[in-house]
């Protein structure tokens, strides 16, 4: 690595956010492994339960989070440009994607419960409700954080504000990537 | 940034198409589905979380976790 690229290397956001990311990744890794072991031990139960999920809910929610992440990344990039333009629209759009995700998730849970499919039905549905609920809490917290970022993105540029904005964005992207693995495990395999 | 988003959407649609296929539980399809998830997570980490700017320990630490969890899940699901 030459001197120039060494100078450009930095930890995005606050270092503490990466400790949180590492901890959350480890906790969710345990969830992923539990689902995979359940799938291994009760293949038929998981396979038939999975076929009762509506893939369209999962697909729409995946696209919503990916697009929300894209908006947040643009918002952070534009803030760093420090060109005096109003960047709040990107955070508003990301908040909207998170809120629609949560509404969509509520509709999905409601449809399942109406069909008599609850956490008590089998291990697949227990994991499905518990882990997607834990993830939905992350989405809710992410929306709250994005509301702060929305406000912060209008503040004059400072290194400290930049790190705060990047940290909040990193949390939102974490929420996105955790969903990608849940989507694969619950809906796709 | 836009290329990353377009790639993520395209890979998501590919995974959806694979999952809708008739050979849904075939080992190769399962591997392909997890490979698409792995690619998406790497793009989010590298481009959106800006690991491309981060020191090597952070970038490769994330990559190590991603490869380890993907291989573990593929192993467990296809057994």
Image (cartoon, helix red, strand yellow):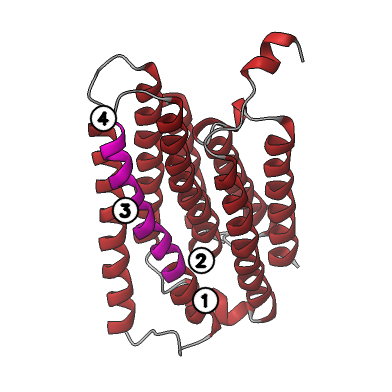
Could you give the CA–CA distance between mark 3 and mark 4, rounded to whole angstroms?
A: 17 Å
Q: Check the residue under mark 2 and report the chain it is in.
A: A
The answer to which quarter of the image holds residue A157 is top left
Evaluate if marks 4 and 1 touch, with contact meaning CB atoms under 8 Å apart. Answer: no
A156 is higher (above) or lower (below) than A174: above
Can you identify the residue that label 3 sits on? A144
| Depth check, front residue: A179 or A183 | A179
Q: Which label is found at residue A154?
A: 4
Whether pointer 1 and pointer 2 mark residues with C-beta atoms closer than 8 Å, the reply is yes
Classed neighbour count for the residue bearing mark 3: other residues with Cα under 10 Å, few (<14), some (14–19), many (≥20): some
Range of magenta residues: A133-154
Vertically, is A150 above or below B79?
above
Q: Is the residue marked by circle 4 packed among few (<14), some (14-19), or many (20+) residues within 10 Å?
A: some
Q: Is residue A138 a member of the stretch shown in magenta?
A: yes
Residue topped by disc 1: A127
Q: CA distance from mark 1 to mark 2?
A: 9 Å
Q: In the rendering, at what x and y percent does residue A104 appear? A: 28, 61
Looking at the rendered structure, the number of numbered marks drawn on it comes to: 4
Residue pictured at 58% horizontal, 58% vertical: A24
Marks 4 and 1, how far apart in space? 41 Å
Q: Earlier in the sequence, mark 2 or mark 3?
A: 3
């Amino acid at each position: 690595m030459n001197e120039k690229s060494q100078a450009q290397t930095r930890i995005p956001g606050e270092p503490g956010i990466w400790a949180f990311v590492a901890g959350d990744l480890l906790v969710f890794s345990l969830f992923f492994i539990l689902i995979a072991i359940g799938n291994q031990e009760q293949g038929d139960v998981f396979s038939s339960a999975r076929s009762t999920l509506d893939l369209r809910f999962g697909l729409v929610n995946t696209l919503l989070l990916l697009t929300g992440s894209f908006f947040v990344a643009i918002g952070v990039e534009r803030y760093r440009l420090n060109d005096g333009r109003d960047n709040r629209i990107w955070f508003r759009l990301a908040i909207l994607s998170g809120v629609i995700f949560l509404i969509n998730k509520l509709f999905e849970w409601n449809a399942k419960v109406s069909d008599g499919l609850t956490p008590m039905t089998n291990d697949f549905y227990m994991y499905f409700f518990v882990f997607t609920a834990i993830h939905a809490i992350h989405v809710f917290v992410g929306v709250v954080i994005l509301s702060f970022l929305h406000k912060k993105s209008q503040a004059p540029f400072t290194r400290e504000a930049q790190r705060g904005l990047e940290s909040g964005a990193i949390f939102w992207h974490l929420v996105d990537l955790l969903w990608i693995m849940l989507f694969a495990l619950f809906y796709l395999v | 940034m836009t290329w990353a988003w377009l790639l993520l959407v395209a890979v998501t649609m590919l995974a959806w198409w694979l999952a809708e296929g008739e050979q849904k539980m075939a080992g190769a399809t399962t591997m392909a589905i997890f490979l698409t998830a792995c690619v998406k997570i790497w793009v989010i980490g590298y481009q959106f979380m800006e690991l491309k700017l981060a020191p090597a320990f952070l970038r490769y630490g994330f990559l190590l976790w991603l490869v380890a969890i993907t291989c573990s899940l593929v192993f467990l699901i296809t057994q």
